[in-house]
Image: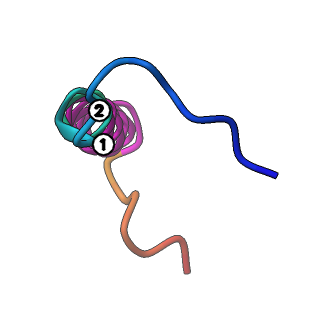
Amino acid sequence: MTQPDNHEDDGNPKFGRLLIVLIIAVLFCVALTWVMGAVFPNFPNFS
C-alpha cells in the first residue's frame, strides 16, 4: 500500500514547516485581536 521512498525522511522538515505555519497562525490571531481592540473600543464585551 505504501510506496518505499528512496530518501531518508525523519519528519523534521515537515514538522518545522508545520511549526512555522502554526506560529504564523497564532501571530495572525493576535494581530486580528489587537486590530479589533483598536478599532472597536468595547471588543471583548459587546453587551
Q: Say what amino acid the circle numbered 2 marks.
A: Asp
Which one is in front, 17 or 5?
Answer: 5
| Prevailing SS of the magenta stretch | helix
Residue 36 picture location, percent across and down: 39, 39
Label 1: element kind: helix
Residue at image coords 53%, 71%: 46
Label 2: element kind: loop
Q: Is residue 37 magenta?
A: yes
Question: Mark 2: few, some, or many residues within 10 Å (few <14, many ≥20)?
Answer: few
Q: Is the residue 44 above or below the residue 29 in the image?
A: below
Residue 4 picture location, percent across and down: 57, 35
Q: Quadrant of residue 18?
A: top left
Q: Is the residue 39 above or below the residue 26 in the image?
A: above
Q: Earlier in the sequence, mark 1 or mark 2?
A: 2
Q: Which mark is residue 9?
A: 2
The residue beneath circle 1 is 22
Label total for image = 2
Q: Quadrant of residue 38?
A: top left
Q: Say what amino acid the circle numbered 1 marks.
A: Leu
Q: Is the residue 34 above or below the residue 20 in the image?
A: below
Residue at image coords 17%, 37%: 12
Judged from this view, the residue extending furthest toward the bottom is: 47
Which one is in front, 11 or 25?
Answer: 11
Q: Quadrant of residue 3?
A: top right
| Residue segment shown in magenta | 18-40
In the image, is 46 to the left or to the right of 34? right
Distance Cα–Cα, label 1 vs label 2: 21 Å
What's the colour scheme?
A: rainbow
Q: Quadrant of the C terminus?
A: bottom right
Judged from this view, the residue extending furthest toward the right is: 1
Which one is in front, 7 or 32?
Answer: 7
Q: Is residue 21 magenta?
A: yes
